[in-house]
Image (cartoon, rainbow, N blue to C red):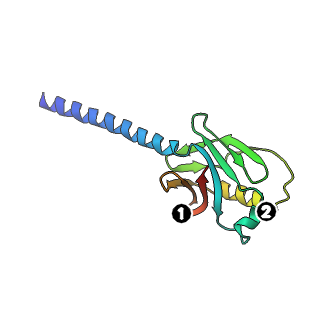
Amino acid sequence: MMKNISILIFCSFLLISCSVFKCKKKDAVSKLEGNWELNYITGPRIAFDGLYPNKKPTINFNIKENQVSGNSSCNSFTGKLNVNGNKIDFTQPMAMTKMMCLDGQGEQVFMAALQKITSYTITDDGKTLNLISGDIASMRFVKK
């Protein structure tokens, strides 16, 4: 009888723990929600303001609709949000407008960097989004 009660208590604890972890996972993902503006990108030899002289790239996460969208500094893009915990994947094809961009390499640098992102962190009390490639913070956005 005591053994059955112990098993029941253990199973109850396991179920409660699982739901707590699912909630934490959802809370982490929900912090992505909203508009973010790029303020740092690694890699290019051109200064950030030289890459984006007129308009900084933005990214928008709609968690409820499971969508990601934004602007590359010239063209708009949209696609399916592929996120699991702090892992994020932008390698799925996205729909993109085809306007002629006169700003040089900024759009190509942004879209190429996005394709390499594997995870994210949110810091500064939810105000900063860091997109990470492997273990290198490749892009930094601020909440708009």
Instruction: For marks 2 and 1, give the one nearer the viewer.
Output: 2
Q: Residue at x 53, y 53 (%)?
A: 127
Task: Looking at the image, tell me whether mark 2 or mark 1 is earlier in sequence order.
Answer: 2
Give percent across and percent down for residue 29.
Answer: 51, 44
Give percent across and percent down for residue 126.
Answer: 50, 51
Q: Residue at x 68, y 51 (%)?
A: 58
Judged from the image, the secondary structure of the residue bearing numbered disc 1 is loop
Q: Residue furthest top?
A: 1
In front of the other: 105 or 94: 105
Give percent across and percent down for residue 16.
Answer: 32, 35
Left/right of residue 20 with respect to residue 46 in the rendered view: left
Q: Residue at x 55, y 46 (%)?
A: 32
Residue bearing the label numbered 2? 105
In front of the other: 58 or 68: 58
Image quadrant in which you'd find residue 22: top left
Location of residue 38 with respect to 98 vertically, above or below: below
How far apart are the alpha carbons under marks 2 and 1? 25 Å
Location of residue 82 with respect to 38 vertically, above or below: above
Q: Amino acid at mark 1?
A: Asp
How many numbered markers are drawn?
Answer: 2
Quadrant of the frame with the N terminus = top left
In front of the other: 51 or 2: 51
Q: Residue at x 76, y 46 (%)?
A: 76
Left/right of residue 19 with respect to residue 87 in the rendered view: left
Give percent across and percent down for residue 83.
Answer: 56, 44
Residue bearing the label numbered 1? 135
